[in-house]
């Protein structure tokens, strides 16, 4: 997922190009949108990208995401650390692991983030859009 070309504005650089010309396969595009489809998965990516962290345990990750969820306009569901932890363990971390964005050890609760500039950029964009109130 991180085989993009460097330099210049991507909108200018990629103007009129197909995903294959951008060196993104259809599977990569599908994976990016699967990651971005839920605010909890976006929050995992933002947690690691913004803090220059590469590893965390699921408990610390759940606590940090719980704080973000309390201010989110995306989802009004229970955002307690225990609920977020269960959601991460049961659904969201396995998705991120399958895609290759993280390594997740279910037994120890260890999460290792590999990063993706594409996912991080779109996660930031999604956050900015969902925080706008002037629609």
Image (cartoon, grey):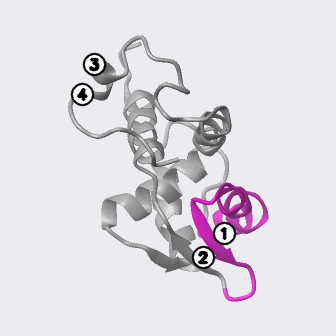
Q: For the residue labelled by badge 1, is the local secondary structure a helix, a strand or a loop? A: helix
Q: Is residue 52 shown left or right of residue 112? A: left
- Characterize the local packing of mark 2: few (<14), some (14-19) or many (20 or more) Cα atoms within 10 angstroms: many
Q: Which mark, by number, is residue 12?
A: 3
**What is the C-alpha distance between the residues marked 3 and 2?**
39 Å
Q: Position of residue 37 (x, y in %)?
A: 63, 38
The reply to whether dot 2 and dot 1 touch (C-beta < 8 Å) is yes
Q: Position of residue 78 (x, y in %)?
A: 66, 54
134 or 53, nearer to the observer:
53
Q: Earlier in the sequence, mark 2 or mark 1?
A: 2
**What is the C-alpha distance between the residues marked 4 and 2?**
35 Å
- Characterize the local packing of mark 1: few (<14), some (14-19) or many (20 or more) Cα atoms within 10 angstroms: many
26 or 64, nearer to the observer:
26
Q: Which residue is mark 4?
A: 9
**Which quarter of the figure has residue 85?**
bottom right
Residue under the image location 53 percent in, 47 percent down: 1
**What is the C-alpha distance between the residues marked 2 and 1?**
7 Å
Vertical comparison of 67 with 26: above or below: below
Q: Earlier in the sequence, mark 4 or mark 2?
A: 4
Vertical comparison of 64 with 32: above or below: below
Q: Earlier in the sequence, mark 1 or mark 3?
A: 3
The reply to whether dot 4 and dot 1 touch (C-beta < 8 Å) is no
Q: Which residue is mark 2?
A: 58
Queried whether the magenta region covers residue 101, the answer comes back as yes
Tell me the magenta residue range: 81-108
């Amino acid at each position: 997922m991180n085989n993009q070309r460097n330099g210049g504005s991507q909108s200018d650089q990629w103007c009129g190009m197909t995903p294959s010309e951008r060196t993104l396969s259809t599977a990569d595009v599908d994976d990016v949108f699967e990651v971005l489809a839920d605010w909890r998965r976006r929050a995992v990516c933002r947690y690691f990208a913004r803090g220059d962290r590469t590893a965390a345990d699921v408990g610390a990750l759940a606590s940090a995401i719980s704080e973000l969820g309390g201010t989110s306009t995306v989802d009004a569901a229970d955002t307690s650390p225990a609920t977020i932890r269960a959601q991460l363990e049961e659904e969201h971390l396995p998705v991120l692991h399958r895609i290759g964005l993280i390594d997740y050890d279910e037994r120890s609760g260890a999460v290792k983030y590999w990063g993706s500039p594409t996912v991080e950029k779109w996660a930031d964009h999604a956050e900015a859009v969902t925080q706008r109130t002037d629609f």
